[in-house]
Image (cartoon, rainbow, N blue to C red):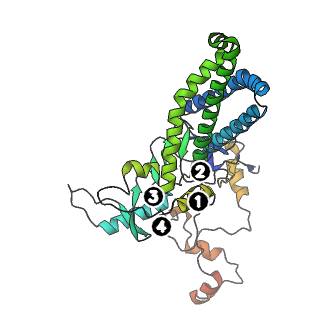
Amino acid sequence: MSAVMIPKKSTRKWEKLPGKNTFCCDGRVMMARQKGVFYLTLFLIMGTCSLFFAFECPYLAVHLSAAIPVFAVVLFLFVMAMLLRTSFSDPGVLPRALPEEANFIEMEIEAANGNVPAGQRPPPRIRNVQINNQIVKLKYCYTCKIFRPPRASHCSICDNCVDRFDHHCPWVGNCVGKRNYRYFYLFTLSLSLLTIYIFTFDIVHVVLRSVDSGFVNTLKETPGTVVEVLVCFFTLWSVVGLTGFHTYLISLNQTTNEDIKGSWSGKNRIQNPYSHKNIIKNCGEVLCGPTYPSVLDRRGLMPEEPSVSTPGASDATATTNTAVPPNTKTTAPLIPNEHTPDEAKPSIATATASIPTEEKPSSPRDFSPKIGPAPIVVKESAH
């Protein structure tokens, strides 16, 4: 009975990626595992806008202008688009080193540092690179087993190295890095405008209705206005302040992580090698630069081999006999090596018996050219 080849289900690379991220939509959506604050962000934005559309917009569209609710809808949709684009995208996660690469890096480090005496602390694993006439240190990540690129850092929450790491934002449920920073900034900027817009027209709505029916009656007729004013009042300061802070960072071409650590303003007074010394150029590079592709290949297929399923233990002999046809040559090398088991090493008698009688050479000199060199067995890595 012949063997039955059962093809395995194809596995995407995102299913095997390390770290503390969650994936949805077959790897298209990538977020952090802690998403509770992100849901709170959605609730606050959608809830406040819903109250504004329900209580203020009908009155303002009639008494002031129909463009007020239209512009509010456009601004709300842009805010939600930037939020989801920031939350659902790869921030710039760097892949971890393969076992072979990690071993090679370890050998390089040991060869460079030499033998460290017992009891002494080994030197830090650092490589120096020169960027715009400035020496930048590349630190070694003991988790990812790589030397991090410039401006990259390891996020302790997502457990991944992120290129141009800015910070981990729980409000968007994701890290903010090289690939989604501009969308995060546009989200904070548009959210500031939306908050100011709603807060302003809430006050206008209360003033207009208070002229006709009084202030107390207005609050009783539109209770959602009070909730909107309170939410916008407490949200306005934090969101506008955050937008102003990131505007300052963009003008200097600097990240939040670098600003907190004082990378370019410490005691050594090292200048920022990434700044163009021009606000317009710095803003253009951060906000209008090229869109970098993801290096994870999340939806790529993992290389897998189909498994061989045998009907039963009684058919083990039949499966073995049919696995190799009678006329198929074995791939075991004629010259034994350390990778060949003893029982699989061919003997001289076996090798001689496999040659037809009429072609059997008379001497070892005639025998060598006809056999040919020993086959080289190449082992393919799973990666």
Residue 252 locus on image (x, y percent): 47, 56
Q: Nearer the viewer, residue 294 or 277?
A: 277
The amino acid on which the numbered mark 2 sits, given as a three-letter code, is Arg
Q: Earlier in the sequence, mark 1 or mark 2?
A: 2
User: Which residue was labeled with disc 2?
Assistant: 182
User: Which residue was labeled with disc 4?
Assistant: 338
Near mark 2 (Cα within 10 A), the count class, few <14, some 14-19 or many ≥20, is some
User: Which residue was labeled with disc 3?
Assistant: 148
The reply to whether discs 1 and 2 touch (Cβ–Cβ < 8 Å) is: no
Nearer the camera: disc 1 or disc 2: 1
- Secondary structure beneath dot 1 equals helix
Q: Residue furthest front?
A: 211
Q: Earlier in the sequence, mark 1 or mark 4?
A: 1
Residue 201 in sight: yes
Residue 24 in sight: no
The reply to whether discs 3 and 4 touch (Cβ–Cβ < 8 Å) is: no
The amino acid on which the numbered mark 4 sits, given as a three-letter code, is Glu
Query: Which residue is painted at 68% across and 54% down in the image?
Result: 320
User: Which residue was labeled with disc 1?
Assistant: 284
